[in-house]
Amino acid sequence: MSKITESALERSFTDLLKEKPVNKITVSDITNRCGVSRMTFYYHYDDIYDLLRQILTKGLAEICESCDPEAPWGGVTKKVYKYIKSNGNMFTNIYNSLGREQLEESFYSYIKPLMTDFSDECMKGLEIDNVNKKSIVDFFINGVVANALDWIKSGMPGDYEARVDRVIVILETGIRAAAEQLAK
């Protein structure tokens, strides 16, 4: 019963996110829409932002799990951009509300392990210390997250696949060039 209730709360909240920003949605809005009590909501979640965090984490995890682990980083990223584009109103409303921080945190946690692996591949054959490696990875993670958030903020214009392709070219050449400059 618990998973059914959580699914109903998630669906109700997701539907509301397509209509209005996070900061305009109340727990009562969510519970009234799916026919459960406020106490039931608080049994499952600390607050609306806890629910938002879980929905974003779950959505990104499902995308990653659906991908071939050997697939290039760009393929996974294209699926994420496609997911964002297909849920455009929801992501725009999250971005335009207090939930923007949750969105940034979710993107960062999703991108960090992927970027670390991708960076290792780009830096192959170079002797680079951990401090410099971390600096490079952190810099490019922040760039990728900012790029995605800027795309959402601007209404998700253009072909997302072409956007991801451009980002990958920048990453491949930028990570390698920075690593070469900072190598021992």
Image: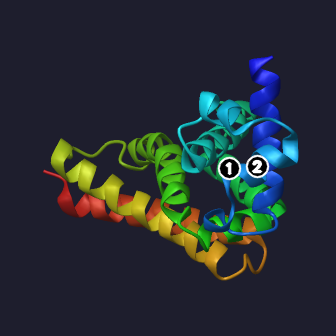
The amino acid type found where label 2 is placed reads: Ile
Image location of residue 101, percent across then percent down: 48, 61
Quarter of the figure that contains the N terminus: top right
For the question of whether residue 79 can be seen, the reply is no
- Camera-side residue of 151 and 106: 106
Which picture quadrant has residue 6?
Answer: top right
Q: Is 27 rendered above or below residue 158? A: above
Looking at the image, residue 101 lies above or below residue 76: below
Q: Are marks 2 and 1 in contact (CB under 8 Å)?
A: yes
Residue shown at the point (66%, 33%) measured from the top left: 39
Q: Is residue 62 above or below residue 1?
A: below
Residues 44 and 149: in front is 44
Q: Quadrant of residue 37?
A: top right
**How many callouts does the rendering have?**
2
Residue under label 2, please give it: 30
The residue labelled by disc 1 is 27
Image location (x, y in percent) of residue 40:
70, 30
Residue at 72% across, 80% down: 155
Q: Which residue type does callout 1 highlight?
A: Val
* Label 2 neighbour load within 10 Å: few <14, some 14-19, many 20+: many
The residue at the point 77 percent across, 39 percent down is 9
| Camera sees residue 103 | yes
Does 99 sit above or below residue 66?
below
Disc 2 element: helix
Q: CA distance from mark 2 to mark 1?
A: 5 Å
Q: Secondary structure at mark 1?
A: helix
Say whether residue 33 is left or right of residue 99. Answer: right
Q: Looking at the image, which is closer to me, 14 or 151?
A: 14
Q: Residues within 10 Å of mark 1 (few under 14, many from 20)?
A: some
Q: Which quadrant of the structure image shows residue 96?
A: bottom right
The location of residue 89, given as percent across then percent down, is 79, 68
